[in-house]
Amino acid sequence: MRAQLAVVAALLVTLTACGSTENTPVPETSASASAALSSEEAAQACTDAVYDADSAAREAGTDADWPMPTECTHLDPGDYVDIVFAVNQQLNKNARDELERQAEEAKDNQQ
């Protein structure tokens, strides 16, 4: 589950970085490779923090009205919103899957 979110977050950061107006190819050096890795790690840290905060809010039965995690403050606001959206989609899918599992279990117990 978190692996899927990590892939989404990494893609979002990569796609946003590719949206620059310059079309001049830049040869990749070890420094730029390290920066890309750092961006992916940063996106993963933000994704994990958002997942934890949103999960805790859901478990507590409250709205996900929590402040932006410090792991996300360095991100572009659009990237942050994309990560929050992806995390919410995953958590909603997890909740639907669990509800379906419980419904199947209840159905099996009635037979």
Image: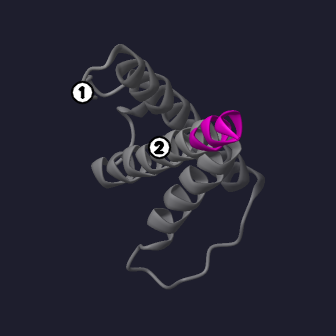
Residue type beneath disc 1? Asp
Residue closer to the observer: 18 or 31: 18
Query: Alpha carbon of mark 2 to alpha carbon of mark 1: how far?
Result: 15 Å
- Residue 26, can we see it? yes
In the rendering, at what x and y percent does residue 104 appear? 64, 44
Quarter of the picture holding the N terminus: top right
Q: Residue 20 at what x, y percent from top left?
A: 41, 73
Task: Determine contact: label 2, label 1, CB under 8 Å.
Answer: no
The part of the image, by quadrant, that contains residue 2 is top right
Residue placed under numbered mark 1 in the picture: 63
Where residue 12 is drawn, which disc sits there? none
Residue at disc 1, secondary structure: loop
Q: Earlier in the sequence, mark 2 or mark 1?
A: 1
Front residue of 4 and 28:
4
| 53 relative to 72, above or below | above
Image-quadrant location for residue 44 = top right
Q: Which residue is mark 2?
A: 87
Picture layout, residue 61 above or below residue 48:
above
What quarter of the picture does the C terminus occupy? top right
**Could one spot residue 43 in this view of the protein?**
no
Report the mark closest to the observer, 2 or 1.
1
The majority secondary structure of the magenta stretch comes to helix
Task: Please state which amino acid type lies under the numbered disc 2.
Answer: Val
Left or right: 66 as drawn, with respect to 103: left
Q: The magenta stretch spans which residues?
A: 103-111
Q: Is residue 76 left or right of residue 25?
A: left
Name the residue nearer the viewer: 99 or 54: 99
Residue located farthest toward the top when viewing the structure as drawn: 60
